[in-house]
Image (cartoon, rainbow, N blue to C red):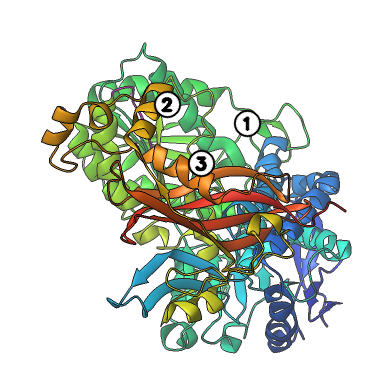
């Protein structure tokens, strides 16, 4: 008997009290492992996540969490060979495994990078700018995101045992939520191995990742408001979860990624000798055969202009004929078996249902000619292409979760979009076209029904990541039948797990709460120029208020001549007088900003290392010759960079004229040494 998989629960590895159910090799039918969760205390897992994992994670800043994700990604890269070897037993070819294992590790790297670049080195994320709520400037509002003191339960499908876990774990971890991962039984041995590697590395704080191998019975009963469930799998199971009382009435947030009848459209502009024709055919065949079509993003419906339907069908059939099927251990095999004999039976049933509205034009639903492998014990199937009869409903309703696609003919862009929408909401659609007008009409028609749309043409084909690849930086999820969930999408996927709150108060209170200086709150002048202070010495609110400087006509003329910016408003008094906004010569906005820098800068070498940008520059009031401008520069936000001996300082710059009226506002971005003098 093979080994019983263990769960990682409440800080230890747990072995069930029975022998469990066998999990079979997809290609050979041999037993790989057994699975059971009998005797597992799921309530203790939830408590452990809440009491141990959550607090440990929320004590870390976004940057610290990101650094752990990066370390984890590097660690998993080192253990990749073992994951690759075991992955073969799920039926995956080397190409399939790359999508799962490397794709999962890549997602960790991507989130690690986003976490540092786009989130603050803090535990709070500020959403948008300050909203002034009172005329006197003493009352304002600021939206912010905080971590929920809950648990993220992640229920995954069998098709991506590594990527499926990591793509849900990474954004939840960054958001400060501990995860309980429940892999699909069929391929749980691969997830278990990855979790073992993670736990043994000791990189993640205890309690932030737990594994539930086996039935999750009773798990949802333990969840409450602040907890969430992210589910990928069948619409049937999604329905069961949606009806759980804790989801219906208990405030548990449920995200669903379920069935999806994704389509790919050949644009009406494309002729058989255009590059887009071949790209389209290649794309469809790739999506049908990678992971033996067991991908939530695979192309199920192939929409083609009616006059090209025969030609496209022939081209697809010809290309599919070259796909070798068999045991994934044989390097000559392009497509492995389905995950289990049970899954093959499900796909065969789906094909039978499809045949009510379509006929098989390539492949045999019952037979498979194999390069290598046992057709009885391995869940093999040849790729199947169907051709829909006009008006058929089945291709829009039945999801064959295997190497199966149906060709449907359309007449005009409008009908193509209407047919696509009959899928009732999908994860992804693609359109092959080189005509920008077609691209716009099709994409805008498809967008409300899809989470992602790919436009494929000769210009992007070489670099295109393809129809079926969810990317960590782009939204993954779709409306309607696809479940209505939204995962990934860079920082969007992180904020999705957090609570947004509008906080109202005085500027001083908002500064204290957010850690970011708020317009209207106190400025501190310590008598030391802030450019002489290291990052460790600087405080939010530290200010340099400059003396005034009068802007002369000679300054404006000099700047115009020196830079070559001789725009009439700065050089031609008569024309400038006719300008309805200025009514005469005005100083260049960039002159004002440059003079302001001259007013606030402290020139001697010091802790300020560089100015790396300006954000939100607005010129509010024209500056005319004779006006006297002054600038107040205030430390707005201090962000130490992990692993560097400097950090970022964001300064609020407000330039005013002699009447105290703001003429320009902006943020100055600098890099400041953590200590000064160095060392
Ligand atoms: P399921 O919905 O049966 O299983 C998905 C996950 O849910 C598994 O981890 C499963 O665990 C778990 N699960 C099952 N029942 C419950 C329950 N009552 N409470 C909590 N969790 C539960 O889908 P499969 O993975 O078996 O795939 C079946 C079909 O789903 C496919 O043929 C395909 O049509 C569709 N599918 C769609 C995907 C998509 O993203 N669009 C992805 C994968 C599948 P266990 O394995 O232990 O039963």
Q: Mark 1 or 3, which is nearer the eye?
A: 3
- Position of residue 336 relative to residue 307, above or below, is below
Q: Residues within 10 Å of mark 3 (few under 14, many from 20)?
A: many
Q: Which mark is residue 468?
A: 3
Q: Give me the residue at 44% from left, 21% from top.
A: 459
Q: Earlier in the sequence, mark 2 or mark 3?
A: 2
Q: Nearer the viewer, residue 454 or 506?
A: 506
**How far across and down, in percent of the image, does residue 628 sit?**
36, 50
Q: Can residue 282 be seen here?
A: yes
Q: Which mark is residue 369?
A: 1
Q: Give me the residue at 68% from left, 60% from top.
A: 63
Q: Which mark is residue 280?
A: 2
Between the C-alphas of marks 2 and 3, the distance is: 13 Å
In the image, is 407 to the left or to the right of 200? Answer: left
In the image, is 619 to the left or to the right of 369? Answer: left
Q: Label 1, secondary structure: give it.
A: loop
């Amino acid at each position: 008997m093979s080994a019983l998989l263990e769960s990682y629960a409440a800080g230890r590895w747990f072995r069930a009290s029975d022998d469990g159910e066998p999990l079979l090799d997809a290609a050979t039918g041999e037993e790989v492992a057994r699975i059971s969760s009998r005797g597992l205390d799921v309530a203790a897992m939830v408590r452990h996540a809440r009491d141990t994992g959550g607090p440990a994670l929320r004590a870390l800043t976004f940057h610290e969490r990101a650094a752990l994700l990066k370390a984890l990604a590097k660690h998993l890269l080192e253990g990749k060979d073992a994951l690759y070897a075991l992955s073969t037993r799920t039926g995956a070819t080397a190409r399939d495994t790359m999508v799962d294992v490397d794709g999962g590790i890549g997602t960790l790297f991507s989130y690690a990078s986003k976490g540092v670049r786009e989130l603050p080195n803090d535990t709070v994320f500020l959403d948008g700018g300050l909203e002034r709520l009172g005329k006197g400037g003493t009352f304002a509002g600021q939206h912010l995101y905080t971590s929920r003191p809950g648990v993220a339960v992640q229920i995954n499908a069998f098709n991506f045992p590594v990527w499926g876990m990591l793509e849900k774990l990474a954004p939840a971890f960054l958001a400060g939520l501990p995860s309980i991962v429940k892999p699909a039984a069929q391929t749980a041995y691969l997830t278990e191995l990855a979790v073992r590697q993670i736990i043994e590395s000791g990189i993640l704080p205890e309690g932030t990742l737990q594994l539930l191998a086996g039935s999750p019975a009773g798990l949802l009963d333990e969840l409450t408001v602040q907890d969430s469930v992210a589910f990928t799998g069948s619409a049937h199971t999604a329905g069961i979860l949606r009806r759980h009382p804790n989801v219906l009435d208990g405030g548990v947030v449920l995200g669903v990624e379920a069935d999806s009848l994704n389509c790919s459209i050949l644009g009406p502009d494309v002729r058989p000798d255009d590059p887009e024709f071949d790209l389209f055919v290649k794309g469809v065949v790739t999506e049908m055969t990678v992971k033996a079509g067991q991908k939530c993003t695979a192309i199920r419906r192939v929409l083609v202009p009616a006059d090209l339907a025969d030609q496209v069908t022939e081209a697809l059939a010809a290309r599919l004929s070259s796909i070798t099927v068999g045991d994934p251990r044989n390097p000559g095999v392009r497509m492995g078996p389905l995950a289990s004999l049970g899954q093959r039976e499900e796909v065969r049933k789906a094909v039978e249902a499809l045949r009510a509205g379509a006929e098989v034009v390539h492949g045999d639903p019952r037979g498979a000619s194999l390069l290598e492998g046992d057709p009885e014990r391995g869940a093999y199937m040849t790729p199947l292409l169907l051709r829909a009869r006009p008006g058929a409903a089945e291709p829009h309703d039945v999801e064959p979760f295997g190497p199966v696609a149906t060709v449907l003919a359309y007449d005009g862009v409008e009908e193509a979009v209407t047919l696509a929408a009959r899928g009732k909401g999908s994860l992804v659609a693609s359109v092959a076209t080189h005509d920008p007008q077609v691209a716009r009409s099709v994409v805008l028609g498809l967008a409300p029904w899809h989470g992602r749309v790919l436009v494929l043409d000769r210009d992007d084909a070489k670099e295109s990541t393809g129809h079926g690849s969810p990317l960590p930086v782009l939204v993954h999820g779709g409306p309607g039948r696809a479940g209505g969930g939204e995962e990934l999408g860079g920082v969007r996927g992180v904020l999705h797990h957090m609570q947004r709150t509008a906080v109202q108060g005085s500027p001083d209170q908002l500064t204290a709460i957010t850690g970011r200086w708020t317009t209207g709150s106190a400025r501190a002048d310590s008598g030391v120029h802030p450019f002489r202070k290291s990052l460790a010495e600087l405080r939010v609110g530290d200010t340099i208020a400059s003396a005034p400087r009068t802007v002369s006509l000679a300054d404006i003329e000099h700047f115009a001549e020196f830079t070559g910016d001789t725009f009439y408003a700065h050089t031609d008094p008569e024309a400038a007088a006719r300008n309805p906004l200025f009514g005469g010569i005005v100083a260049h906005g960039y002159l004002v900003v440059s003079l302001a820098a001259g007013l606030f800068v402290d020139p001697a070498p010091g802790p300020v290392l560089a100015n790396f940008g300006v954000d939100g520059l607005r010129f509010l009031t024209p500056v005319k010759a004779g006006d006297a401008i002054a600038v107040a520069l205030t430390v707005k936000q201090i962000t130490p960079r992990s692993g560097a001996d400097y950090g970022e300082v964001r300064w609020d710059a407000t330039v005013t004229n002699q009447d105290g009226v703001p003429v320009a506002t902006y943020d100055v971005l600098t890099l400041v040494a953590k200590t000064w003098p160095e060392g």
